[in-house]
Image (spheres, rainbow, N blue to C red):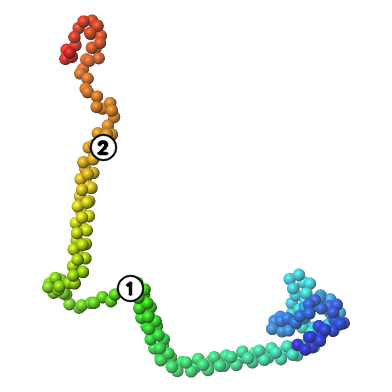
Amino acid sequence: MDRMSRILRDSGAQNIIQDQVITVRDDRYVMPLKPNFRQGIKGVVHGHSGSRATVFVEPLEVVEQNNRLAELRMEEREEVERVLRELTGLLARDAGGIGATLDAAAGIDAIAARARFGTEYQGTVPELSLTAPAASSCREAPAHHRKAAVRRDAERRTERHRSFRERQDTDHQRPERRRQDRHPQDDRPAVPHGAGRYSGDRRRGKRTPGLR
């Protein structure tokens, strides 16, 4: 890093330096230079910008340092893998206990969730029995339960009565609707046969039978 900083500060290299920064390409430190960088700096190209106006170059002076950094990174990865393998082996010895602990934690969490749900919706715990209740136990039900049952029965009877009355009203309205739907001319009295000759026969002084 020190060598690259000195290169950036060098007055002789200002005409080929694109930006006064040090960046990373392919895990190696590089400098952004202009395409004509070969006039003042020798190095390894690790890429260029989209416009190709900037070239990312690793100066030859820092290649060895970058190589050493790459070796240290590989050693670091190997050490991390070794530690993880060791920890995995330790956990594998107690896999049964860890699994039981996980199941217990899941059960506790489920119970807590049900408790929160019941508290939020003001739920109650029902009393269950494995045997059928005796006949007398129905009469010994709490008073508010008996009142609720009586109220529900009365509501059902009222609903049935209302439905019956609605059906009756519908049946009574059907003939009236049929009469209202008839054409006004349908209510005209029937005209006897031959009534059409009444006016002519009267002028001739004759009376049509059946008419007065």
Distance in Å between CA atoms under marks 2 and 1: 54 Å
Identify whether 194 is placed above or below 21: above
- Residue at 66% in and 89% down: 73
Where's the C terminus, which quadrant?
Answer: top left
The vertical placement of 190 against 94, above or below, is above
- The answer to whether the residue labelled 2 contacts the one labelled 1, judged by CB atoms less than 8 Å apart, is no
Q: Earlier in the sequence, mark 2 or mark 1?
A: 1
Amino acid at pointer 2: Arg
**In the rendering, at what x and y percent does residue 81 appear?**
57, 90
**CA neighbours of label 2 inside 10 A, class few (<14), some (14 to 19), many (20+):** few
Residue at the outermost top position: 204
Q: Which residue shows up at 54% across the image and 91% down it?
A: 84
User: Residue 46: horizontal and vertical position, in percent?
Assistant: 74, 79
**Category of crowding for the residue at label 1, using alpha-carbon neighbours closer than 10 angstroms: few (below 14), some (14–19), many (at least 20):** few
Look at the image and tell me in which quarter the N terminus lies.
bottom right
The reply, left or right, for residue 31 in relation to residue 119 is right
30 lies left or right of 123: right
Residue 164: x, y in percent?
A: 20, 50
Q: Give the answer, above or below, for where 24 lies relative to 205.
A: below
Q: Position of residue 177 (x, y in %)?
A: 26, 37
Q: Secondary structure at mark 1?
A: loop
Tell me if residue 95 comes above or below residue 20 in the rendering: below
Residue located beneath label 2 in the image: 177
Location of residue 200 (image quadrant): top left
Q: SS at mark 2?
A: helix
Image point 19% across, 61% down: which residue? 153
Q: Residue at x 61, y 91 (%)?
A: 78
Residue 44 falls left or right of residue 179: right
Q: Amino acid at mark 1?
A: Gln
* Residue 115 appears in view: yes
Out of 122 and 109, give the one closest to the viewer: 122
- Can you tell which mark lies on residue 122? 1
